Image (cartoon, rainbow, N blue to C red):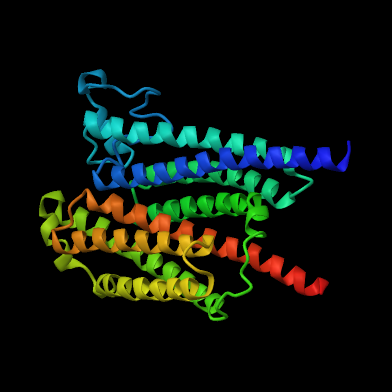
């Protein structure tokens, strides 16, 4: 095969891979949103067993379809508070079905990376790794159920979801590396790289504090009950208030990063656009967080807050990867000179 034909074939494979990966990443984010909604609605134990639901592959629609002593059966398994609720059961079951669908999509992503194994091995390794990570995530899901939604296990489950997102975004960034290497950054403000690492570190710290706040929220929910949502804030520890105040620092740091890009690369550069998307997501996160803090922890705001944090992580990771690829082009040019 000639070099030109081989290049065309690789470009076609890359284009196909990018399309599939974008769909897969979007689906993973949708699953994160659905999972957050399941937790906020209190439906996390809608199915007290795994992979079946009340011992059935298709859950019941009415309590009469269960054994008369089902509560006693699950109490002996460590789930003393089990009570069938058709809405919560099917909410959790649909969440599981979406998770299975994501598994098939990531498997398809791994298959589509096979033609790229020689031209860009990183894409192939990342895609296959994401597939195995999904398998591990399924095992974690079973452990979350068997632990009766133990907060630490839920946090690990969430962090694993972000790790899968990061792995897929790494592969996607590699697949669009050719585009970024054509983006000129020779005039970029030299302070940008330093501040990029600063805001990335801030995001990781903020998400870490957020997971602790989330665990404390679960603990307070269990202690006080769903009916006392408006008083949950009063029971929060000191790091909740640090987490809430730190969001302003994160916002202004990213505004400064955007200023550096606007003045050095202009409004139209892809890195500038990424940064403004990051600022928009931070604004949504701040608004949803303020809603939680000042309006009595409404359930609808919890998924929005978690989803915004997940998007923030993904966008900043993609910004970092895009900058690395654009910088690599500049470094190569310097070596050739």
276 versus 26 height, above or below: below
Tell me the quadrant of the picture where the N terminus can be found: top right
Q: Nearer the viewer, residue 194 or 310?
A: 194
Q: Where does the image place residue 251, in percent across and percent down from the top left?
A: 35, 71
Q: Quadrant of residue 134?
A: top right
Q: Residue furthest right?
A: 1
Q: Residue at x 13, y 58 (%)?
A: 296
Q: Residue furthest bottom?
A: 191
Q: Quadrant of residue 156?
A: bottom left
Q: Where does the image place residue 227, in percent across and percent down from the top left?
A: 11, 50
Q: Where does the image place residue 8, in percent across and percent down from the top left?
A: 76, 39
- Direction from residue 107 to residue 88 in the image, left or right: left
Q: How many numbered circles does the render carry? A: 0
- Direction from residue 290 to residue 59 in the image, left or right: right
Q: Nearer the viewer, residue 261 or 110?
A: 261
Q: Where does the image place residue 127, in percent across and percent down from the top left?
A: 63, 45
Tell me the quadrant of the picture where the C terminus can be found: bottom right
Does residue 146 show up? no
Q: Nearer the viewer, residue 22 or 63?
A: 22
Q: Residue at x 65, y 62 (%)?
A: 325
Q: Residue at x 74, y 38 (%)?
A: 115
Q: Nearer the viewer, residue 35 or 149?
A: 35
Does residue 224 show up? yes
129 versus 264 height, above or below: above
- Direction from residue 136 to residue 234 in the image, left or right: left
């Amino acid at each position: 095969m000639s070099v030109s034909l081989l290049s065309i074939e690789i470009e076609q494979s890359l284009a196909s891979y990018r399309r599939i990966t974008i769909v897969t990443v979007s689906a993973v984010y949708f699953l994160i949103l659905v999972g957050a909604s399941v937790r906020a609605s209190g439906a996390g134990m809608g199915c007290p067993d795994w992979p079946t639901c009340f011992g059935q592959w298709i859950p019941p629609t009415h309590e009469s379809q269960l054994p008369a002593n089902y509560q006693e059966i699950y109490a002996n398994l460590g789930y003393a508070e089990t009570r069938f609720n058709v809405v919560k059961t099917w909410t959790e079951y649909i969440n599981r079905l979406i998770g299975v669908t994501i598994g098939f999509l990531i498997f398809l992503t791994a298959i589509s990376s096979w033609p790229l194994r020689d031209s860009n091995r990183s894409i192939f390794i990342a895609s296959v790794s994401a597939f195995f990570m999904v398998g591990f995530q399924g095992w974690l899901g079973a452990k979350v159920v068997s632990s009766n939604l133990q907060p630490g296990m839920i946090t690990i489950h969430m962090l694993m979801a972000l790790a899968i997102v990061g792995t897929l975004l790494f592969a996607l960034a590699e697949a669009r590396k050719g585009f970024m290497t054509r983006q000129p950054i020779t005039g970029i403000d030299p302070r940008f790289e330093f501040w990029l690492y600063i805001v990335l570190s801030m995001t990781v710290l903020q998400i870490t504090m957020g997971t602790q706040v989330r665990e404390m929220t679960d603990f307070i929910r269990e202690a006080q009950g769903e009916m006392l949502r408006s008083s949950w804030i009063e029971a929060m520890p000191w790091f909740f208030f640090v987490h809430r105040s730190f969001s302003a620092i994160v916002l202004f740091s990213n505004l400064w990063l955007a200023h550096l890009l606007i003045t050095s690369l202009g409004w139209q550069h892809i890195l500038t656009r990424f940064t403004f998307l990051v600022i928009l997501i931070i604004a949504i996160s701040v608004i949803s967080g303020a809603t939680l803090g000042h309006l009595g922890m409404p359930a609808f705001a919890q998924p929005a807050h978690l989803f915004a944090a997940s998007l923030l992580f993904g966008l900043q990771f993609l910004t970092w990867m895009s900058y690395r690829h654009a910088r690599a082009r500049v470094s190569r040019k310097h070596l050739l000179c």
